[in-house]
Image (cartoon, rainbow, N blue to C red):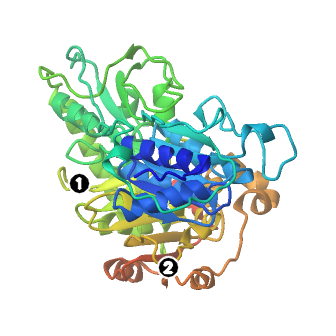
């Protein structure tokens, strides 16, 4: 209900919150500040009325990634912050949302227009601060609006709100029907997966590549046509009988070289063998649309499809093609398990496999970039269709920043999740360790964060810079050992911590969650990671 003595800042802030509610936003993450006080008060009142869920974080970067995680697994979320450098700290999460096509509302408080171009405190040019990839709506630039409309598509929207003093409301906001009626309520649509215009010729030797966010249609197409499915862990397609575990080890074999056509869905980013496959001159590439602001493919596409879902009249290919891939996959997988079983101590692959087995039906797994998601790619198998396990990752730009916060947001955002886990490397964990800072009374998920700690960045040891010729500078420039005591770090935030050094210890820890957020530190070695991966890549059916 509108109060007669509302000031301009209060009216503007409440109009923005009404717009958020109308756009389907049900979670708002607030970082503290003075200039955004009108927005914070309005969000508080809306939360008190049961219209949304309020989260607070002291760090804007963490707040933005929490909102990103919420948006990735639930309804679109918003993050609210004050002016100045606070806005710049949102940029990594905004870029990830833009390139991954995740709907996210970024609400930044700003100084009134008359202070633009002056040395006023915490004042900078915030309009367009996120660049041409993100639309900015400058609210209140010409005075307070009576109402604001906000529509969300795939990707982030920046709402820059100019607020002048006084910044505090005269009285609490008691929301009534007339407040909510000022903005058209809009329920955000779920994923839309159009079918092909016509069936695909089953004749060419074809594989389906499912990258990040490909969704179930890629699996359905592979099943309908009888084609092998090369699905990344976060594709949403890595279930069923056609999904191959060790596909990237098969692409450089005679079987891989016999591929004539590839159907691509989602955003494939993990594997160099897949990249080489998509760049081959002798392979026809058919691609379904990808989400994100840069939806064009980095490889030549022969045919653009409307989607990856199969046509109802899609015919099946010669079953011998799929049978050859399944047999080869089983043979290489047996060799891989034998190789890892003979390794002394705990390997990163052991950790990834144990985490995959620990995800229950209805469960959620958030995976960090670099080595963990690639390790999981080789160890994830046997998930049945219909169990509703969900794997998510920040693959829009594949950054290691904000992963802890994103995992917390994703766990909070997914309705009905039976358990949530996260698999991250130690450098990734340290990059966002302040994501563990939650104040009393904050919504907290049941989330087990498994940190694969090899004291540095092992991903680089498997790349060109990890070659012996660069050993004299590798540790300082790329491995970056840190010697951080993760137990002490977790103790500082009162986060339960387990350290494990063997697979049985890890499996016990994963089978006995404490509830709330906890960290399981799995200690692995790094000195022989390059040699181990060379042996794995040499496996053949």
Work out which residue is located at the far front of the displayed protein and give it. 4
Q: Where is mark 2, residue-wise?
A: 440
* Residue at 40% across, 83% down: 505
Question: Residue 182's mark?
Answer: none
Residue 436 position, x and y percent, is 55, 72
The reply to whether residue 372 is visible in this rendering is no
Mark 2 or 1, nearer chain start: 1
Answer with left or right where residue 488 lies relative to residue 495: right
Answer with left or right where residue 349 lies relative to residue 240: right
Work out which residue is located at the far right of the displayed protein and give it. 119
* Residue at 24% across, 28% down: 309
Circle 2/circle 1 CB separation < 8 Å: no
Q: How crowded is mark 1: few (under 14 residues within 10 Å), some or many (20 or more)?
A: some
Viewer-nearest residue: 126 or 238: 126
Above or below, 227 against 44 in this view is: above
SS state under label 2: loop
Viewer-nearest residue: 350 or 156: 156
Residue 269 position, x and y percent, is 50, 40
Q: Where is mark 1, residue-wise?
A: 388
Residue 109 position, x and y percent, is 64, 48
Residue 480 position, x and y percent, is 73, 64
Answer with left or right where residue 213 lies relative to residue 115: left
Above or below, 75 against 192 in this view is: below
Work out which residue is located at the far left of the displayed protein and give it. 313
Viewer-nearest residue: 177 or 59: 177
Q: How crowded is mark 2: few (under 14 residues within 10 Å), some or many (20 or more)?
A: few
Q: Which image quadrant is residue 323 in?
A: top left
Q: How far apart are marks 2 and 1 (CA)?
A: 32 Å
Above or below, 516 against 431 in this view is: below
Q: How many numbered marks have been drawn onto this rendered protein structure? A: 2
* Residue at 20% across, 17% down: 199
Between disc 2 and disc 1, the foreground one is 2
């Amino acid at each position: 209900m509108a109060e007669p003595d509302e000031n301009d800042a209060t009216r503007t802030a409440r109009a923005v919150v009404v717009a958020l509610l109308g756009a389907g936003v049900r979670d708002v993450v607030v970082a503290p500040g003075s200039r955004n006080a009108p927005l914070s008060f309005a969000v508080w009142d809306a939360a008190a009325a049961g219209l949304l869920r309020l989260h607070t974080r002291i760090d804007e970067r963490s707040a933005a990634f929490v909102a990103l995680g919420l948006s990735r697994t639930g309804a679109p979320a918003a993050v609210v912050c004050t002016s100045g450098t606070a806005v710049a700290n949102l940029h990594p999460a905004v870029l990830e949302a833009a390139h991954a096509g995740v709907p996210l509302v970024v609400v930044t408080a700003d100084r009134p227009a008359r202070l633009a171009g002056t040395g006023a405190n915490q004042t900078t040019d915030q309009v367009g601060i996120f660049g041409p990839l993100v639309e900015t709506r400058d609210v209140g630039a010409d005075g307070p609006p009576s109402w604001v409309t906000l529509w969300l598509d795939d990707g982030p929207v920046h709402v820059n709100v100019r607020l002048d003093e006084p910044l505090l409301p005269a009285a609490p906001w008691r929301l009534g029907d007339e407040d909510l009626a000022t903005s058209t309520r809009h329920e955000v649509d779920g994923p839309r997966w159009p079918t092909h215009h016509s069936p695909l010729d089953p004749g060419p030797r074809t594989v389906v590549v499912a990258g990040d966010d490909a969704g179930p249609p890629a699996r359905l197409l592979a099943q309908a046509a009888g084609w092998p499915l090369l699905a990344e862990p976060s594709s949403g397609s890595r279930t069923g009988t056609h999904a191959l575990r060790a596909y990237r080890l098969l692409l450089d074999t005679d079987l891989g070289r016999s591929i004539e056509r590839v159907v691509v869905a989602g955003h494939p980013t993990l594997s160099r063998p897949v990249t080489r496959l998509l760049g081959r001159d002798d392979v026809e590439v058919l691609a379904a649309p990808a989400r994100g602001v840069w939806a064009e493919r980095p490889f030549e596409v022969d045919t653009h499809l409307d989607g990856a879902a199969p046509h109802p009249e899609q015919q099946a290919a010669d079953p011998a093609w799929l049978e050859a891939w399944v047999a080869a996959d089983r043979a290489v997988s047996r060799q891989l398990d034998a190789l890892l079983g003979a390794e002394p101590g705990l390997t990163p692959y052991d950790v990834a496999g144990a985490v995959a087995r620990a995800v229950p039906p209805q469960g959620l797994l958030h995976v960090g970039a670099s080595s963990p998601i690639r390790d999981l790619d080789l160890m994830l198998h046997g998930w049945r269709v219909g169990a509703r396990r969900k794997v998510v990752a920040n693959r829009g730009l594949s950054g290691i920043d904000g992963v802890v916060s994103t995992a917390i947001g994703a766990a909070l955002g997914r309705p009905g999740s039976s358990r949530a886990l996260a698999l991250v490397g130690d450098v990734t964990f340290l990059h966002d360790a302040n994501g563990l800072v939650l104040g009393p009374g904050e919504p907290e998920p049941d989330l087990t964060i498994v940190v694969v700690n090899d004291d540095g960045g092992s991903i680089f040891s498997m790349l060109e810079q990890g070659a012996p010729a660069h050993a004299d500078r590798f540790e300082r420039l790329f491995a970056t050992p840190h010697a951080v005591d993760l137990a002490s770090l977790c103790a500082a935030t009162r986060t339960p911590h387990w350290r494990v050094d063997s697979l049985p210890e890890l499996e016990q820890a994963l089978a006995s969650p404490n509830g709330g957020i906890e960290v399981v530190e799995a200690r692995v070695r790094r000195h022989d990671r390059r040699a181990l991966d060379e042996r794995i890549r040499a496996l053949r059916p």
